[in-house]
Image (tube, helix red, strand yellow):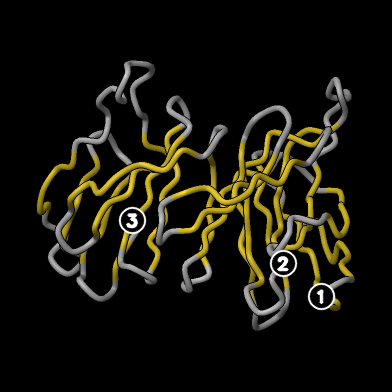
């Protein structure tokens, strides 16, 4: 993750490496892997996100089910956010809200107020889980969660699914099939398309025809 204002980059390694994006020289190592208060598992960095709202980097840890918050100018840990699940990809609107998709067998999205560093809502997906991708249409407040499994218990063979939902209240707008288990997603506002990349070498492209109408445009 990169903060373009300070020119600082951060890797989701353990410890987190902070580096100068111009010279590519390491500035410091940031220890985020220690045990949490009261004991329990040790953090393991995975997903990472920079949010320009307050110039912070968020590093997501599976075992501790939280986000480690780092000041991107100083490279100091300012706290953690309890996410209530196994976090994967996250998106932010740059205006104080962040959403994180959960990889649990029963998937969900956690909404976070970055000002208070508190989760404000948890939006469950029911029998869709294994979610690794999350994209945001900020203008229309739509989230796209790309998941690997569905059914309770999970059906075989797996039915990878994209859950499309309101970022305002978590209401599910529709679900669409994916060509494989997603490991990342992104939204392109210029074309109103969502791209979900999969471990089987495929890419599903979803078209947002309107804020309430979506279709699979192509499996590539």
Question: Is label 2 in a helix, a strand or a loop?
Answer: strand
Q: Residue at x 41, y 50 (%)?
A: 48
Q: Earlier in the sequence, mark 2 or mark 1?
A: 2
Q: Residue at x 73, y 77 (%)?
A: 192
Mark sitting on residue 142? 2
Left-right relation of 30 to 42: left
Kindly indicate whether the residue at mark 1 contacts the one at mark 3 (C-beta within 8 angstroms).
Answer: no
Left-right relation of 209 to 82: right
Q: CA distance from mark 2 to mark 1?
A: 7 Å
Q: Earlier in the sequence, mark 2 or mark 3?
A: 3
Kindly indicate whether the residue at mark 1 contacts the one at mark 2 (C-beta within 8 angstroms).
Answer: yes
Q: Residue 9: x, y in percent? A: 25, 59
Label 2 crowd bin: few (<14), some (14–19), many (20+), radius 10 Å: many
Circle 3 sits on which residue? Answer: 57
Q: CA distance from mark 3 to mark 1?
A: 30 Å
Q: 37 or 52: which is nearer to us?
A: 37
Question: To which quarter of the image does residue 36 belong?
Answer: top left
In the displayed structure, 136 sits above or below 80; it is below
Mark sitting on residue 211? 1
In the displayed structure, 128 sits above or below 99; it is above
Q: Residue at x 39, y 71 (%)?
A: 53
- Quarter of the image containing the N terminus? bottom left
């Amino acid at each position: 993750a990169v903060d373009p204002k300070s020119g600082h980059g951060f890797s989701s390694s353990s410890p987190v490496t902070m580096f100068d994006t111009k010279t590519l020289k390491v500035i410091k190592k940031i220890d985020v892997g220690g045990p949490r208060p009261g004991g329990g598992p040790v953090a393991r960095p995975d997903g990472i996100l920079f949010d320009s709202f307050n110039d912070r980097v968020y590093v997501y840890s599976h075992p501790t089910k939280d986000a480690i918050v780092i000041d991107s100018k100083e490279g100091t840990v300012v706290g953690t956010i309890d996410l209530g699940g196994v976090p994967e990809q996250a998106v932010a609107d740059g205006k104080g809200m962040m959403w994180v998709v959960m990889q649990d067998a029963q998937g969900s999205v956690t909404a976070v107020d970055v000002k208070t560093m508190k989760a404000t809502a948890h939006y469950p997906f029911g029998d869709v889980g294994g979610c690794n991708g999350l994209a945001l249409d900020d203008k229309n407040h739509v989230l796209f969660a790309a998941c690997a499994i569905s059914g309770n218990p999970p059906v075989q063979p797996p039915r990878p699914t994209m859950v499309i939902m309101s970022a305002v209240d978590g209401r599910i707008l529709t679900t669409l099939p994916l060509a494989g288990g997603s490991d990342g997603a992104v939204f392109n506002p210029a074309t109103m398309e969502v791209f979900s990349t999969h471990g089987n070498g495929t890419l599903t492209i979803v078209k947002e025809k309107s804020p309430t109408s979506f279709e699979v445009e192509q499996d590539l």
